Amino acid sequence: MPQKNHYAFVIDVARCIDCRACLVACSVENNVPMDHTRIWVHDQGIQGNWPYLSHAFVPYNCMHCEHPPCTEVCVSGATYKDKVNGLVLVDQEACIGCGYCVAACPYGVRYIDQKRGVVDKCNACLQRLEVDLEPACVATCVGKSRLFGDLNDPTSEVSIALRNAKSVTNLDYENGETDTDPNIYYLNLPETESILSSDPFGQVAQTSLPRDPHYTIAEQGWKNVAIPLMAAAMGATFLVQAIFFTKQLLEGEKEFDE
Amino acid sequence: MPKTVISRREFLKMGGAAASVFAVGQFIPPPVARAARQAGSLDDNGNGYICTLCEMCVWRCGVRAKVDEGRVVKLEGNPEHPHSHGKLCARGQSGLMNTYDPDRVLTPLIRVGKRGEGKFRQASWDEALDMVAENMLKIKSTYGPEAMVFSSTHNLSQPLFENLLYGFGSPNYGTQRSLCFNAMVTAFLLTYGIEEPARNYDNVQYILLVGRNLTEAISTSETTEMIDAMARGAKLTYLDPRFTKTASKATEWMPVRPGTDLAFLLAMINVIAIEELGNCEFVKEFTIGCDLLPTHYAEYTPEWAEGKCGIPADTIRRIAREFAAAKPNALAHPGWRTSNFINSFQTERAIAILNAMVGNVFEVDGCLIAESPEAGGIALGAPPQPPYPRVSASRLDGVPWKYPLVPLKLGVFQELRDAVLTGQPYQAHGWFIARQNPVLALPDLQRTLEAFNKMDFIVTVDIIMNDTGWFSDVVLPEASYLERYDPLVPMKDYIFIRQPVIEPQGEAKSALMIYKELGTRLGLAEFFQYKDEEDYLNQQLAPLGYSLEELRLHGHIKVPMEAKSEEITFNTPSGKVEVYSETLANAGFPPLPTWEEPPQPKAGEFYLLTGKVGQHTQMGTQNNQLLHKYQDEPRLWMAPEAAQTLGLEDWDTVEVTSPVGSVKVELQVTPAIRSDCVYLTPGFGHLSMALRTAYGVGASDSQLHVTYTDPISGGQALSQTFVSVKKAG
């Protein structure tokens, strides 16, 4: 059965002023911990020779890929591509926080919420979509750079924007068996630097990392613990089973308490 | 069933979980929730949206606040408000974190340690207000009312603040304006008879921004409208010594030498006047003095300007022609914070005249609208009050005896501080500060602290322990903008309301009530004839026949107004746009904008530039954790060639020294700045250790700024300070 909706972001780089209203709005709407973020504005750096300089800002978040590598590696089935709306979502009840998907995402848009022990990322503000509101980042975008909507609907703002665009770029990641076909479409993306394309796996995430945010609440210790690497080294199956077992045990105990 | 007796305070202490249990039961909700339910904003569980006004900057966007069981959980732009169009900037989005700042001051505080030591004890409102009143009355009886200085920054409760100060009998009123827009306001008053004309981007084809960094000094609706205009194909020429984010969006960036944008503009006037490219009809009918321009400006050729500002003559000539060709759909933006150089007033006059030359000043659909963005024809009521007592003392800030053309409501704040310090023409002894941080805002922080030391008594009203509160004797906790009413504000044919969306936290109170309760203790009850905030607002609405209830649900009321006359009038002595100003001539100043050579740094020194970032407002938001999360490290910008000459590298800690002070800060080597300039992100370098998020981050340019005042507008010249930079030892 074909998808009912084909949700996508269309981002006009020419309109982004890097004001970061989207970043703050997302953090508030989704209660993102102070030491994490779900969305970024990539600073391409100042290009050109004085005084003919240019400076572009590229907003991004989960690309809600057509062929997401993250769902492939998810051992608990928590990360999935929704069959109705096409969004890549995390069922945090089912997530065991193993971190495979974090490593698998070529765009580096997932993080582990240490407090809850689950993976978190952009869900296109599903809770807002359900009540007919745009995602928080789109609703507040001061430059109207961010658009969101249903590509299956030819009258949607995103469909119209893509139809009228002179050129559209998406940051497709192709590597042997993987071809992500991301659902963020960029308008007016400068050609000077292709921020994500054709980089080897892993390096993509590095080069596309956001500005290093300066955090108030210093809980960055976990960053030094390379969870995915550890997992690989210890033997994935064993670890996953162990975590799953522990989690069940804990939850079981909690139920007992109540 | 036993009757539940619970105070509002106890209710709040119980927190959200408990609140929800009560909310669905028999419990009577606290006042804010009750009013919101009556208006239909909140459901029976206390969930819903309440419309109010943002206060994260002075633009005052409309807000829809999402409330969930007594807590505000998300802010949205109100699509029905012309300043937000449904959007909020980063600061607006973060507003709830100001309210929930863990460093909020939630009870009155009385100093117990030495000034600046940061030791305070909690006090009741009665004790704190009694103490403030006692000290103020003592100063009044000993030295006269003029010995009390009052200062506050542009906000909606200002009419009541003014009642307090003028009722008390002091002429000494400090506002932030001379540190901000005195040059612009004075120039437009003298040229058009209006403080700040509104901008209209509907038909604009050519935008000239002279240092108006609209994508970082964000005025939400205007920023959106400018980006929209550019997407439609409007050209943007941007003058700034820095390659800001606005420069990155501009069609052309002109990296002028600081202080010489005036030369660029005079040459534009020269080209348009001599080549007769202006809008002749408009010029003939509505201006006086344009005929003088070709002869008086003959010397201001693009070739002359090139020698001053460093932009090639051909470029200036071409831009003048393109600007004029777009007439009347060309806009030279009046600017915002225009306190850059002593000559900034002349720069602003030149901008005013360029707009007149292309004839874009029409009331209805011109690019420049001869009415202020906040102008409203709606006459609100007000509680009755007696006339203010007569004041015989002259103002300490020199208005008008030293600064004859500076409007009284603008004042010259830095001069006021200096008069406190010198005791001339008389000594001030007390300072009442509301919602303002002069310690970090005024140039030359050391002098401001010395002036504070001259004071017998200092009291600050704020929501957090800002740097000024840190050096005060009493700090009074104000309710945040999400917790209080403010006086209503008309805007065009609308009335908008700032109303509480949650109960005030701790003991915090609205300014309306703080001023009333203090005023009553000072014997000024007649100036505060309202029972509470709602009573004040109802008295404002009374002549219009609306009730507060009608305002609550949508946050605004549209008032039917008579259609405006099509006639263009200018509130100047001649009734026309005064390119030539008799008023200026009579005061002994040049009647036409004239070149004034700005000072230049010596070899080895840099211009110290200031500016804005999109994530902060002045020095008041750095403790907001959400903004802190997404801000850039506030470093000192320096061009690569300058850094190389000094042997400095990116992220080096450098010592920046001016004639009045020095700071240490990390270096950001960037091609985005002229090599003769450095730029320090403003608003950081807080002294108050009670600001646990902001303390220790960045440096304050107020420690470096030398005090220079423009004799015409009273504006402080914030970019006229020169500094040396070396690696910190």
Image (spheres, grey):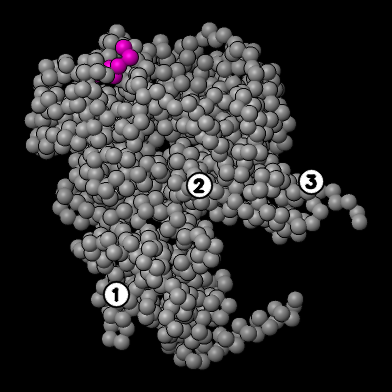
B574 in relation to B249, above or below: above
Q: Chain of mark 2?
A: B
- Chain identifier of the residue bearing label 3 in the image: B
Question: How far apart, in angstroms, are the residues tagged by discs 2 and 1?
Answer: 37 Å
Q: Position of residue B444 (x, y in %)?
A: 39, 31
Instruction: Report how far apart the C-alphas of labels 2 and 3 lie in the structure.
Output: 33 Å
- For image coordinates 59% across by 51% down, the residue present is B49
Task: Check disc 2 and give the amino acid type.
Answer: Asn
Quadrant for the N terminus of chain B, please.
bottom right
Residue corresponding to mark 2: B78
Q: Which residue is mark 3?
A: B7
Q: Nearer the viewer, residue B112 or B400?
A: B400
Q: Determine which of the numbered discs, if any, sits on residue A172 in the image.
A: 1
Residue A244 placement: quadrant: bottom right
Where residue A69 appears, as percent x and y from the top left, is 38, 81
- Evaluate whether residue B325 shows in this view: yes
